């Protein structure tokens, strides 16, 4: 781990305001970009480091999609979840406009307007802890899947396993036991 000053970012303030437990970790800002590189720098599996991706539909709607560093979104599954036949990754300038952050360390919470859709891949919900960007490269937030869902109002769906159905989970009351 990289040792530097403790920084308080808007993502930290948001989680603190909700009383959500998390752990701050830092890594060298000279680490090459990408969630897989963050996993290696911090000693976690790639599945535990979350890619926060912004997709857009033709409606036009934007959605935050969270998958592991070692995963790719199955287009057909995401189309089903978003209810749109036309989806694409948002361009970097659109991501900045929508989130207020540049691609590389987009926190999955605090910037979304009411009703913004967020989806967590089902396989991530089975991990003990997940790492998400804190909004500044070199800063990571470690959080349980349950608390991540709570902070993001995410639905859970299979977005990455093409051999299985989408299986959207909207009622999470008994999901995390």
Image (cartoon, rainbow, N blue to C red):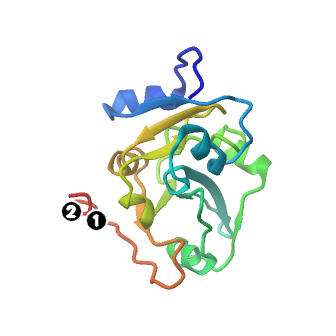
Left or right, 165 with respect to 93, comes to left
Element at badge 2?
loop
Q: Quadrant of the N terminus?
A: top right
Q: Are marks 2 and 1 in contact (CB under 8 Å)?
A: yes
Left or right, 22 with respect to 61, comes to left
Q: Quadrant of residue 82?
A: bottom right
Q: Quadrant of the C terminus?
A: bottom left
Q: Which class describes the residues within 10 Å of circle 1: few (<14), some (14-19), or many (20+)?
A: few
Per the rendering, the mark at residue 171 is: 1
Q: Quadrant of residue 30?
A: top right
Q: Position of residue 165 (x, y in %)?
A: 45, 83
Q: Nearer the viewer, residue 35 or 101?
A: 35
Q: Is residue 144 visible?
A: yes
Element at badge 1?
loop
Residue at position x 26%, y 63% in the image = 175
Most distant residue in the top direction? 5
Per the rendering, the mark at residue 174 is: 2
């Amino acid at each position: 781990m990289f040792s530097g000053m403790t920084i308080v970012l808007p993502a930290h303030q948001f989680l603190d305001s909700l009383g959500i437990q998390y752990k701050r970790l830092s890594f060298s800002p000279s680490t090459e970009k990408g969630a897989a590189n963050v996993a290696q720098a911090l000693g976690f599996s790639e599945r535990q480091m979350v890619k926060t991706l912004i997709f857009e539909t033709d409606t036009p709607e934007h959605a935050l999609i969270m998958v592991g560093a070692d995963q790719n979104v199955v287009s057909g599954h995401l189309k089903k979840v978003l209810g749109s036949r036309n989806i694409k990754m948002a361009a970097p300038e659109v991501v900045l406009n929508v989130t207020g952050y540049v691609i590389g360390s987009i926190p999955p919470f605090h910037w979304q307007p009411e009703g913004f859709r967020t989806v967590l891949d089902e396989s991530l919900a089975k991990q003990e802890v997940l790492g998400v960007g804190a909004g500044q490269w070199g800063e990571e937030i470690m959080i349980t899947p349950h608390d991540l869902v709570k902070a993001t109002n995410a639905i859970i769906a299979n977005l990455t396993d093409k051999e299985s159905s989408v299986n959207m989970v909207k009622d999470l009351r008994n999901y995390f036991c």
